[in-house]
Amino acid sequence: MSDNVVYDVTEGVGTITLNRPDAMNSLDSATKAALRDAAISAAEDDSVRVIVVRGTGRAFCVGQDLKEHAAALEAGRGLANTVQEHYNPLLRALTSAPKPVIAAVNGVAAGAGAALAFAADLRIASDKAAFNLAFANIGLTADSGASWTLPRLVGPAKAIELLMLPETIGIEQAAALGLVHRVVPAEELDAAVGELAARLATGPTAAYAAIKKAVGFGLAHSLDQTLDLEAELQDAAAATEDHRNAVRSFLAKEKPTFTGH
């Protein structure tokens, strides 16, 4: 990690905090590398049962650090392979992680920062949050998975509109479009995220992983193929100790305890 990204694991919750508040958590090379490595660590760590991504200061993340990027352009290095080395591994780690991912969107999320939020399974946003798919404003196309996640959230026509005609999407519009799971007052964001993370961290982790896998698979495959995968995943879920204990608890009219196995 680096000072720009703080990674902590507490009671099954792996929290990744972007910590460049003076730069609105923009992504320079060191921050991108640390963010990627933290996401991979959280995804691969069996002790982590839910991942939270958050920002400090006024912004969630405003995307690429354009000062560093401008210097790279002047030096003739273009994008310096950052999409392949940083953004793609980061997004693959979060979307394929066998555990829920929460984005705690405290402020503006723009460009790759918006795409980072969209890669989460659930997004809780402050009433001060906003989004902007700013890529086209600087002559770029979408990256960081935005062309995959955004159409699945708002539909292809709206996604093209938001990408071709980028403008700031206020929190009310974002909620109406389905870009966020829940909106809370800014002062309640940490508590709301903590409550949701705690619930997921003590839930049936294997079932959550199967849900993510099935939904992602179903978006790109036929019903017959998805039914086959559902049967396979359900057989695996039924063999978990969590399932057996939950059934026993239900019959005993007790609240189940899930261990994630």
Image (tube, rainbow, N blue to C red):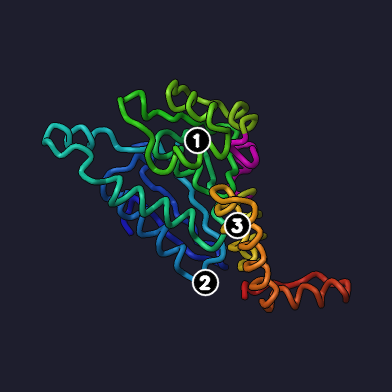
Type of residue at label 2? Ser
Mark 1 to mark 2: distance in Å? 29 Å
Q: Residues within 10 Å of mark 1 (few under 14, many from 20)?
A: many
Whether residue 180 appears in magenta in the rendering, the answer is: yes
Of the residues shown, which amino acid type is indicated by label 3? Gln
Task: For marks 3 and 2, give the one nearer the viewer.
Answer: 3
Quadrant of the image occupied by residue 229: bottom right
Secondary structure beneath dot 3 equals: helix
Give the residue drawn at x 77%, y 71%.
Answer: 256
Quarter of the picture holding the N terminus: bottom left
Residue under label 1: 107
Disc nearer the start of the sequence (3/2) = 2
Q: CA distance from mark 3 to mark 1?
A: 40 Å
The vertical placement of 168 against 8, above or below, is above
Mark whose residue sits in front, 3 or 1: 3
Q: Is residue 152 left or right of residue 111?
A: right
Residue 71: % across, % down:
17, 35
Which quadrant does the C terminus fall into?
Answer: bottom right
Q: Which residues are magenta?
A: 178-191
Whether pointer 3 and pointer 1 mark residues with C-beta atoms closer than 8 Å, the reply is: no
Q: Is residue 57 visible?
A: no
Q: Please report the residue visible at 74 percent of the width from the left and 77 percent of the height from the top.
A: 244
Q: Is any part of residue 209 visible from this angle?
A: yes
* Disc number for residue 47: 2
For the residues bearing labels 3 and 2, Cβ distance under 8 angstroms: no
Q: Please name the residue that numbered disc 3 is placed on.
A: 225
In the image, is 159 to the left or to the right of 248? left
Query: Is residue 121 part of the magenta span, yes or no?
Result: no
